[in-house]
Each structure stands twice: as structure tokens, then as C-alpha cells.
Amino acid sequence: MGTGVLKRYKDLLPITPSTPIFSLGEGETPLITAPRLAEKIGCKELYFKFEGCNPTGSFKDRGMVVAVAKAMEEGSKRIICASTGNTSASAAAYGAYCGLESWVVVPKGNIAMGKLAQALMYGTRVIAIEGNFDEALSIVRALVKSSPITLVNSVNPYRIEGQKTAAFEIVDELGKAPDMLCIPVGNAGNITAYWRGFVQYCKLGKSGSTPMMLGFEAAGAAPIVEGRVIESPQTVASAIRIGNPASWQGAVQARDESGGIIDSVTDEEILESYHTLASDVGVFGEPASAASLAGLFKLARGGTMDLSSKSVVCVVTGMGLKDPDTALKTRADIIETPAELEAVRNALGL
Ligand code: AN7
């Protein structure tokens, strides 16, 4: 349909006659089937929901278009967010489209290069704090209490509403809910949103069941798994370097109501799946996005769950091109030769 989230899901979103309807082309992302990897893992069907195909390269656009439309409806002129990178790129793009002033607060030195480039190009004001995401979020939450600025982090309920549309798309495409959904967990807004979407579709009679929700945090940034705030979270997956998720309760509820789990995966496991996803499936996600596949591998290795009859969807939350540094740091096997036929032939072993 190519109409965007607001138009396509008008009836299932908090939209009124005075909500502006616009789109940068968010949503309708591919659900990619991966039969060879399914066989390797031992599950019946495996799909990747590639959210990197959204206009700014991450799932955030689904929620941002709703949050920004509502900000416009309310007459707001300025938006702000804290971000590990993707939210800032998305806020900046939709802010630019709507002519809003946008500000983003990011953890200095811990945001992928492509995301920073996006925020700057879209014309947002970037403030890099000497601190982490959790500190940035508490600063912007305090700021909006005393200034007329709309907060567009996922504590803004319209963000979650928009993001649930990814669950709708999965059910629409498969004709039913999958048995399991694997998803990275950072600030925990997305797992909350997917669960809301699956439950809503079930209540509407559009699916007969809801999936088991399997959320995965990075091991050095796993507050929900450890049951405590992590003061100084660490992980190669900078997008989910979060120690005190705003939607903590939403994630726990999704886990418990769906009979699922929230577990952690190590940086090593994340990087291995990051490479597997690209080289075995042709899907280049960013490191944080590989946490879902890493989690599925861990589950399969653990052997506690019989996956052989299960259909599994792994959410690939963001585009790998956003973080060329991690790609090039972990895959550097380039062969250099003189510009001669023989040299290239030799290099290829022909
Ligand atoms: C690629 O941009 O929090 O659990 O500030 O960018 O809903 O937070 C990003 C999070 C997963 C985690 N994958 O989602 C931000 C930000 C990617 C992400 C997550 C993020 P949530």
C-alpha cells in the first residue's frame, strides 16, 4: 500500500480527525524467510522482520510518526529525546519533515557514527553528554517538566502505539501469530509495543493466538535479567547499552503474560549472530539487532525447549550500515593487490 503507519492503521491508533496524516514511508518492512538457518537451529520456520528498511533505518520510525503527529496536533513546536542513536535519527527526520525544532541528548562516544550523521544531517541540535543513556533520559525527562517541549522517547505513549504496528504486519503476512518472537531489549519499549499489538490483534479476532515473547538484553547491560539497575552498562551493542529501562514493567508483563523469557546474550554471542545474519541470510542488521538471533541460538543450545514444531520471528531492529565501525573492526579480511590481472587471479586462487 505504501501509505505509512498513520493511514494504514488509522482505526487501531489514537488518531482523531485533527491528527495530521503524513509519512516518510515507515512500516511494511520485509518478513524474510530463512530456511537454511531454521534447519541449523532446529526450528520449523524462521523469519526475520527487517526493521532496518524503515526510512531512517530502524523500527523507531513507526512510533515516531505517531508521536510527532500527536505533537503537531497538540500545537507543539519542539521535540526532544535522549537516545543511544536510533531514536535521535528518527526524531530528527520526522521533526524535519514537520518543520519542528528538534533536540537530541546522546551519550558522548557511545553512539554509532551513522546515527550521529543522520541526526546532524536532518538538522537537529545534538547535545553529547559525558554520561550514559540513562542519565540523558533523566535529564530530558526533567527538562520537559519545566519547558514547553514534547518528549518523544518511548515514555511518550504514542511511541508504543505506533511500534505495535510491526506485530500487526507479522500477523497479516503469516495469516496468524508466530509461536515465538525474539526481540532485543534496551529501554524495553519495543517488546512492550509488540506484545500490545499481538494482544490487540487477538482480541480483534485477527489471530487465534499470541506468541511467546523472548526478549534479550546484552549481558553487560541486563537490568531486567539481573533484577537491578545497572549503573554503568557496557556492551558492543551501543543501541541497547541501557541500565534502567523506562518500560521495565512492560517487558516483565510481556514476558509473564506470554509465558516467555527475558535472558541475556554476551557480546561474543551478539557479534557471532551479527555476522551469521549478514553472511548466511543476507540481512545486515546492526549489532543490537543481532541480540534476537543470538538469543534464539542460546535457547536452541540450551535444549530446554523443543523448537522443532515452532515458527519463530526474530526482529532485526536496525540497519547495519549505521555502524560501519563495528563491521570493519570485526571483519577486516580485505586482500590488497596491484592493479594487474595475474595478481587478482592469484589472490582468488584461480
Ligand atoms: C537497533 O535509540 O533506545 O527496548 O535511544 O536502537 O525499545 O529500547 C534504541 C534502542 C533495539 C532496543 N535495537 O529497543 C535509542 C534506543 C536497536 C535499537 C533497541 C534499540 P527498546
Image (cartoon, helix red, strand yellow):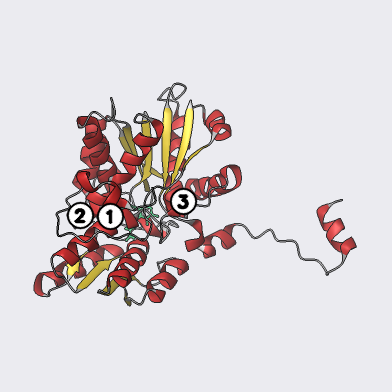
Determine whether label 1 and label 2 are within 8 Å by CB.
yes
Which tag is nearer the camera, tag 3 or tag 1?
Answer: 1
Question: Who's the residue at 27% across and 66% down the image?
Answer: 82
Residue 267, disc: 3
Q: Earlier in the sequence, mark 3 or mark 1?
A: 1
Instruction: Give the CA separation, mark 3 to mark 1.
Output: 28 Å
Observer-nearest of 350 and 58? 58
Question: Who's the residue at 37% across and 43% down the image?
Answer: 183
Q: On screen, 52 above or below 104? A: above
Regarding ligand 1, which quadrant of the image does it lie in?
A: bottom left
Residue 158, disc: 2
Determine whether label 3 and label 1 are within 8 Å by CB.
no
Observer-nearest of 229 and 177? 177
Badge 1, how many Cα within 10 Å: few under 14, some, many 20+?
A: many
- Residue 141, horizontal then vertical, whole percent: 17, 66
The amino acid marked with disc number 2 is Tyr
Q: Quadrant of residue 56?
A: bottom left
Determine whether label 3 and label 2 are within 8 Å by CB.
no
Would you name the residue on which mark 1 appears?
63
Badge 2, how many Cα within 10 Å: few under 14, some, many 20+?
A: many
- Residue 94, horizontal then vertical, whole percent: 31, 66
Q: Earlier in the sequence, mark 1 or mark 2?
A: 1
